[in-house]
Amino acid sequence: MKQFTFRTIIQKDGKGFHGFVPSLPGCHTYGDTIEEIRKNIKEAVKGWIEVTAQQGWDIPSDEGIETIETIQLSISGQKNNFTYA
């Protein structure tokens, strides 16, 4: 049995959540709660890998690094109208 590790992205989408795996094209799912979307993403990845393996195609590896950065800005007189150079 082989173990795979992939980055997943979960975003709020209306009343629920949209989840996807950047390194697996077309691997998207939806859930009403965070718990549901995490379960659905695992099922979607499993199905994606099984179909890919059955077709004899290569299964990509996720070698990207993702970070979350917090940046503090002091901007006065602006109402979320930022100008980027």
Image (tube, helix red, strand yellow):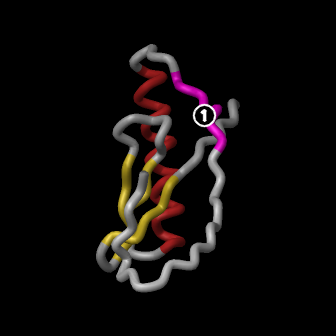
Residue topped by disc 1: 62
Q: Nearer the viewer, residue 47 or 32?
A: 32
Image spot of residue 23 (x, y percent): 49, 35
Q: Is 28 drawn above or below residue 11 in the view shown?
A: above
Q: Residue at x 69, y 30 (%)?
A: 2
Image spot of residue 62 (x, y percent): 60, 34
Q: Nearer the viewer, residue 23 or 70?
A: 70
What's the residue type where badge 1 is placed? Answer: Asp
Name the image quarter holding residue 72. bottom right
Q: Residue at x 43, y 57 (%)?
A: 19
Q: Is 68 drawn above or below residue 81 in the view shown?
A: above
> Outermost residue toward the top?
56
Q: Nearer the viewer, residue 66 or 45?
A: 66
Q: Which residues are magenta?
A: 59-65
In the image: residue 21, left or right of residue 62: left
In the image: residue 63, left or right of residue 12: right
Name the image quarter holding residue 12. bottom left
